[in-house]
Amino acid sequence: MSKYGRVRIKDIAKELDLSTATVSRALSPETEHMVGKDQVKRVRDCARELGYIPNLAAAALRNQKTHVIGVVIPDILNPVFPPMIKGIQSYLFTQGYITIFVFSNNNQEEALEEVRRLAMRNVDGLILASAFLEDRSVSECLLQEIPLVLANRSIQEGHLVHQVLSDDQHGMELAINHLISLGHRHLAHFAGPDTILQGLKRRQAFEWLCQQNNIEFDIINCDQDDTYAFSVDAGRVGARDYLESGGKATGWIAANDLMAIGAIETCRKLNIQIPKDISICGFNDMPMADIVNPSLTTVSVPFEEIGEQAARMLVKEIGSPWPSKQRWLIAPHLVVRESTAKA
Amino acid sequence: MSKYGRVRIKDIAKELDLSTATVSRALSPETEHMVGKDQVKRVRDCARELGYIPNLAAAALRNQKTHVIGVVIPDILNPVFPPMIKGIQSYLFTQGYITIFVFSNNNQEEALEEVRRLAMRNVDGLILASAFLEDRSVSECLLQEIPLVLANRSIQEGHLVHQVLSDDQHGMELAINHLISLGHRHLAHFAGPDTILQGLKRRQAFEWLCQQNNIEFDIINCDQDDTYAFSVDAGRVGARDYLESGGKATGWIAANDLMAIGAIETCRKLNIQIPKDISICGFNDMPMADIVNPSLTTVSVPFEEIGEQAARMLVKEIGSPWPSKQRWLIAPHLVVRESTAKA
DNA sequence: TTGTAGGCGTTATCAT
DNA sequence: ATGATAACGCCTACAA
């Protein structure tokens, strides 16, 4: 092969009898104007010929900028995240960034550990989609002065960081109005854990809106522990417990689609017909929500858009930090399918 | 705050009036034995106090080793990949590696571009799950001498790279035997593109096994273009075309679950009952295959295991390259659910 | 337009 | 046991 191991600028310089400075300049679009046109061509050709691949680790060390963004995702198996990942990655790609996705298994300790690892890699910025209302990852980032955007989550001290969120209050309103308009007068909410933003917000909105509308309601807490939160299993068990304890609501709203699917499964086992006997509404409109049995009526949260918007804000923040932090709400919409019907 | 920007080894050294060498040694588990016990403690304490975070880019530059693995995934929205991603990531995490996942949108050019970007980042190794039987990414890796494992895919020159694959021939046998045992005597295969390993292998296996069993069969090519391959839409259109052209098979095997779901949808629209009129079998057993309507009988491919095994082989290969390249087959199994029944 | 030289943060070699 | 120093590959002020 080539007479070099991995080709460096130095090798090209030697080959063409130039200085490394000239080669470096010729290779970079921002500086090539300082070099003669003919030289640029010579250098470029030679680089291609020798199979030169720049060593970005070295450049990063020198420039104090890696063009790497870190993203912490709580659970890769949760189907809402792939669209968000896509939104993040495809925008950052266009901006010349590479994205490191790490997965925290819904675990605060792991998330913090991952954030530290990312900090060691000198990421230029961080997007946290990991889910807890309070955890130390955020303070760690602030301490390290790493530009930060929270995607689809929030924290108590909202003024310290940028946030991109779906408007869950509005989403819950869409779901409740839908069920009410179908004639349901007793609703139930299968809630996620209060330690996670969506769990808290959706439960609060449900409670408040039912009271506003003078509707009888029950709230079922399905969360045993954090890894179990928002799972099909949580919905399964929640529904079973609710029915066994004599719950009478005819309109159910789950905190997410997976829990709705779990609830539907339990109903099927108990020979309860959906939507004839009970209407069930999900939340998120995850991929596949349209092909389950029955297909899910659900509040559609635009995760890809959330991801892209978060990435967009982060890039801006890296370019020039905003003095005040933004809280960006994205409106969900209702998708009516087969799992809801007249009471 | 601290009086330093980001704390470096040099800062700790100055603080404790030691040399950078001693501090570096004290901080690294492999070299701390060269330093007095008391010093180690002083250094560690000081590092914690100042909030020292090692700069791995610098270490990588010095050590010619980044502890970064790159993984190319063709499509994050394809539900078979999250389990594979999990398998890869969780194993590599335990081995002290960080993983960069990139997505090529089923596009060869993008995959190659991503591989180049990863090479610039000096990844220690690469896992390619991107799907084509022939593309330039592999040769690029070989050229750059980057340790390489193919996950769930293959190439013509199989002896040049490690591969971890599901045994599709065996999987197809399970599916066909299942349908035959249910009394089906005319089978159809909704095939993926021949340019992708699974498309090719599954079609070939289907053809051969039908001939072996003296079964009448049809093959429907659903692939228009690469981004469309293996999608719900491909299955939808394939089924419609097949039925409109008078296809009579009572047992269908799709090249993957998404296509099976698309085919089911078309049947539902045409008032064809599954599995009463036609039995449909999928391939992969993706997450959610158990909750679609009707739930899918499918050949279950253990993607998480494939991912973990690929990662395992890659780490070994990085440690000490094997002279001969391995081809590792993982056996799928059949999961019988509601979409297949007696003819 | 081109070249020289120093430094980004870390670690290994060599000397003490 | 500890310190001085060079080197990893790249970029850029400064000099010519």
Image (spheres, coloured by chain):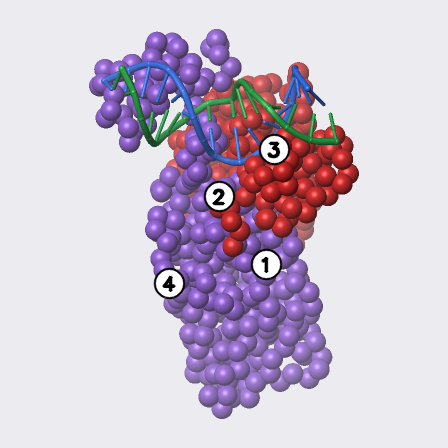
Chain colours: A red, B purple, C green, D blue
Name the residue carrying label 1: B136
Q: Based on the displayed image, in which of its 4 quarters is residue B302 positioned?
A: bottom left
Q: Nearer the viewer, mark 4 or mark 3?
A: 3
Q: Amino acid at mark 3?
A: Thr
Label 4 to label 3: alpha-carbon separation: 39 Å
For residue A337, side relative to residue A61 (left or right)? right
Name the residue carrying label 3: A20
Label 1 to label 3: alpha-carbon separation: 30 Å
Name the residue carrying label 2: B123
Is there any visible trace of residue A309 in the rendered image? no
The subunit letter for the residue under badge 2 reads B
Q: In the rendering, at what x and y percent does residue B82 appear?
A: 50, 51
Q: Nearer the viewer, residue A184 or B4?
A: B4
The subunit letter for the residue under badge 4 reads B
Badge 1 or badge 2: first in the primary sequence:
2
The residue lying at 47 percent from left, 58 percent from top is B150
